[in-house]
Image (cartoon, helix red, strand yellow):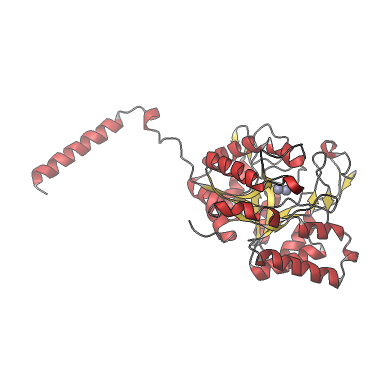
């Protein structure tokens, strides 16, 4: 380069710098952060039952919502069901996912395995034969293409009509069996366990049947489960929107410090949602949560617990009712991710899911 051209460049550079120096500060701000595509590890499809079952319609709705909110990929789980319901598992919707294999993966067991666990809720009834059959059923779920087990329930508070109350300790003998299978197959378990730290009266909001008047401690069972098989990856669901009060950032932090096999998926809700220990408050990120999310940035994921309902589903049901919360939750989640430091958002929004769920790079 001639010295004249170099001088011209240098002068142009100085003019450019000088121009920026006089731009008012507000104009010099970087543009609002565009959100990188993220992964939702906890999504439900509602396709109706029996002859009218239409999971393909629910998948179409899911794709629309995923495109609208920047979700690159979602993990679909059958909800945690019990015998009193018309139990279904992943085999009911797996065919409908085939058209979008690049957008979905799925877990299994929320129907078949969870209903067995709660059928034998009393540990004394779990014979060797029950364990053998359960182990075989769990193995088949992974053999047929599921990449993990869920949604499994230890304590599942009933939040509305038709929504089951379920309770076993998280270290129930069959959840221990499941932890062993999960460790052997190197797949995660998605666990719904409403947090109770010491027995307590059921809060008034949930003090209706089928919930009992008192709730037993659940935190002890979770500690025993994660300690029982450190090779089993447990993803504790619904962090950041706690219905009962004990799923605090401090409690999660203590568990994570002691147990590297524990992760937490975050269900971010808006400021209006009647939940406790919320990660996102009316004024932004909760300071205790920021500290925890930064300290254990490799251990959190996003699991919105959205319910995508096929337009052909007639009638109500808890899933249809919960679907009304999808948009506020998804908006809150996008806002939440945009408030996190860039590197933490990349981990929680995408990288941790890719690693823990062994998703193929895209
Ligand atoms: Zn759940
Ligand atoms: Zn769920």
Residue at the extreme front: 51
Residue 43, given in percent of the width and then of the height, sits at: 65, 48
Q: Nearer the viewer, residue 213 or 24?
A: 213
Is residue 314 something one can see in this rendering? yes
What residue is shown at x 75% (from left), y 53% (from top)? Answer: 88
Q: Nearer the viewer, residue 32 or 223?
A: 32
Residue 82, given in percent of the width and then of the height, sits at: 82, 53
Establish if 265 lies above or below 319: below
What residue is shown at x 21% (from left), y 33% (from top)? Answer: 15
Splitting the image into 4 quarters, where does residue 205 fall?
Answer: top right
In the displayed structure image, the side of residue 362 where residue 282 appears, left or right = right
Establish if 294 lies above or below 149: above
Residue 228, given in percent of the width and then of the height, sits at: 74, 67
Establish if 189 lies above or below 23: below
Residue 148, given in percent of the width and then of the height, sits at: 66, 60
Splitting the image into 4 quarters, where does residue 334 fall?
Answer: top right
Splitting the image into 4 quarters, where does residue 48 fall?
Answer: top right
Q: Nearer the viewer, residue 62 or 299?
A: 62
What residue is shown at x 77% (from left), y 40% (from top)? Answer: 317
In the displayed structure image, the side of residue 155 where residue 280 appears, left or right = left
Give the number of callouts.
0
In the displayed structure image, the side of residue 118 where residue 267 appears, left or right = left
Q: Nearer the viewer, residue 350 or 292?
A: 350
Is residue 49 something one can see in this rendering? no
In the displayed structure image, the side of residue 360 where residue 233 appears, left or right = right
What residue is shown at x 56% (from left), y 52% (from top)? Answer: 99
Establish if 263 lies above or below 143: above
């Amino acid at each position: 380069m001639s010295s004249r051209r170099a001088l011209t460049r240098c002068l142009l550079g100085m003019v450019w710098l000088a121009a920026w120096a006089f731009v008012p500060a507000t104009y010099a701000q970087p543009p609002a952060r565009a959100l990188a595509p993220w992964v939702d590890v906890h999504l439900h499809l509602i396709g109706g039952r029996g002859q009218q079952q239409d999971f393909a319609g629910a998948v179409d709705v899911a794709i629309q919502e995923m495109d609208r909110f920047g979700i690159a990929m979602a993990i679909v789980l059958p909800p945690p069901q019990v015998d009193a319901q018309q139990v279904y598992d992943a085999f009911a919707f797996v065919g409908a996912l085939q058209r979008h294999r690049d957008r979905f993966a799925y877990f299994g067991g929320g129907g078949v395995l969870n209903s067995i666990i709660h059928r034998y809720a009393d540990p004394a009834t779990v014979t060797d034969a029950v364990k053998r059959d359960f182990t075989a059923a769990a193995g088949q779920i992974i053999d047929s293409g599921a990449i993990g087990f869920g949604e499994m329930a230890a304590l599942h508070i009933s939040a509305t009509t038709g929504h089951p109350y379920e309770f076993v300790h998280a270290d129930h003998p069959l959840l221990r069996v499941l932890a062993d299978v999960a460790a052997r197959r190197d797949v995660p378990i998605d666990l719904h366990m409403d947090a109770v730290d010491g027995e307590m009266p059921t809060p008034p909001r949930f003090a209706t049947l089928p919930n009992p008047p008192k709730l037993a401690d659940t935190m002890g069972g979770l500690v025993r489960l994660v300690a029982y098989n450190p090779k089993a990856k447990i993803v504790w669901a619904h962090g950041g929107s706690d219905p009962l009060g004990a799923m605090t950032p401090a409690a999660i932090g203590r568990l994570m410090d002691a147990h590297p096999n524990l992760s937490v998926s975050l269900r971010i809700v808006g400021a209006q949602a009647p939940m406790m220990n919320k990660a996102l408050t009316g004024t932004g990120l909760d300071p205790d949560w920021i500290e925890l999310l930064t300290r254990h940035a490799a251990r959190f994921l996003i699991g919105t617990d959205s319910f995508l309902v096929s337009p052909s589903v007639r009638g109500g049901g808890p899933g249809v009712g919960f679907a009304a919360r999808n948009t506020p939750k998804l908006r809150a989640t996008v806002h939440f991710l945009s408030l996190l430091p860039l590197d933490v958002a990349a981990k929680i929004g995408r990288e941790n899911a890719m690693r823990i769920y062994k998703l193929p790079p895209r």
